Amino acid sequence: MQETRLRESPEDAGDRRRPGILSADSPAWLILVSALFLLSELLPALLRLPLGADEITYIARTSARSSGVFLPPVHGQGAGLLAAPVTLLTTSLTAIRIWMAVLSALALLGSLWCWRSLRPAWVLALAGFIFGSLAITQLSGVQIYPDLWAGFGALAITGLLLQAVERRARRTVVLPLIAFAALVIVLMRPQNLVFVLAPTFVAPLVVRGWRKPGVLVAMIVGAVLGVAEWVVGAYLWFGGLSNRISWAGQEPPSFGLHFSLSMQIRTMSGPWYSEPRACTSAQIASGCKTLPGVSEPAVLLWWLAFFGLVALGLYASWRRPSRASSVLAVVTGGWSALLYILLVPFGAPRYFLATWALFAIVAADGIGWLVTVPRWKTACVPLAGAFLVSWAISQHVVLVTETAQATSVRPFEQKADAIKRLGLRPPCAVGSPSVAYFLGCTGPWTGGHVSEIFSLTPGGPSAWKKISLPPGAPYRFAWVRR
């Protein structure tokens, strides 16, 4: 039979075998955006940022610095375990910050990689750039907090779920990865079982073509292992599961319906925290505000553009095979945001990192659609470039401003040094766990009482006595063992 196919030239065959290093689906795009994210985290101000109050409680049990500081009962140990390879060896702040920066850059790469074959690599790189440019992402990347890791986990498990139900990856590979992603998400914070994972659990049950028992089993195994760490910790450090549950229920904020949308909007461009406060007339006259103002109001315009791109990406994918993945990303991200808006009475942008990670995928779809439509391409390519560059610059402004503010309100080590000069030495206790960490003392967790901490120490409360500190000390009282 006569050969009717056109012969390939040697050059064409070579091009087919060896796609360009920056071809549309080259993994080099993902490596590049992860490297840029790492560089953005190595800002000197970030590397010098003192440890925050929550960070200290996360690393207290895995630190080279001995102290009696407890992890708050409601928290998971996941963030501290991530930092442990460094914190167990050194107390160097720079070493801790660099370690977390490297880990978060690798996590960005890995979570985007979980979407390979679902999107071209260059679109995923756009999503990584949008998410990685966020001021709160870069700040969280060097800090020992669980929220960014829940975001990476949400991004990863959503992509892996889609890979599994659409049979784009081998079960022997994708199912263990799903279990691992679920483990990480729950290990970071047990509440993530509802706040992050709920839509991922429900999707394989309600979507007919996605009903794969193996996927559900993998997620359940990972989630159970994550909860198991919290249960084991209850017996190791809190005197049992019932004690830990009781104390966790007493931690602020109290559980109930709240509507914190206005505060969440305030934190989208700084400050990092927004909480309503009751001010007396005298306090108002001295500058007390019921709500902090928006640090960089102009940045909210870029957030509007971001949400517009999310809507556009959802529209663009509606008649494409990618529709299911876009809908799942928006639903999962929206679910997490809704729960925080309704159930948390204060604003904190780090709680929304899982939302922004998933929304970034759909926003990148919107940009990808705009720059590939022939009749719009000429105008939209420079507009998209301007959006991305101005987004990164405006977020950098927020980062610099808020990092300076955060540095100014973390004088924990200086307070500890002042108390040391007064002669206080371990075993001891003070009212702030952040200061107690640098003293080598113990202290109550947020919303807790010193008596609760004493009940977990040898001899109980009766083994401690209260002493007065000299005038000028950061605190009026401290406790020492009898």
Image (cartoon, helix red, strand yellow):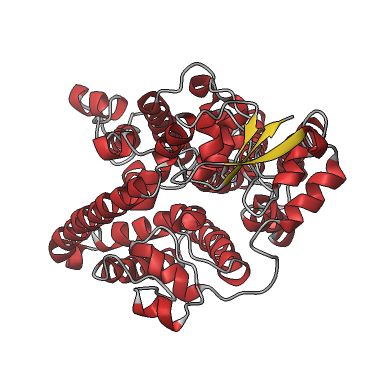
**Residue at horizontal 80%, vertical 50%?**
245
Residue 254 falls left or right of residue 336: right
Residue 57: x and y in percent read 58, 38
Rendered position, 246 above or below 260 = above
Residue 233 falls left or right of residue 175: right
Of 220 and 143, nearer the camera is 143
Rendered position, 233 above or below 122 = above
**Residue at horizontal 24%, vertical 23%?**
14
Of 107 and 190, nearer the camera is 190
Residue 239: x and y in percent read 84, 37
Residue 174: x and y in percent read 61, 34
Q: Quadrant of the N terminus?
A: top left
| Residue closest to the far top | 89
Any part of residue 326 in sight: yes
**Residue at horizontal 14%, vertical 59%?**
382
Residue 187 falls left or right of residue 124: right
Rendered position, 314 above or below 79 = below
**Residue at horizontal 20%, vertical 63%?**
374
Q: Quadrant of the C terminus?
A: top right
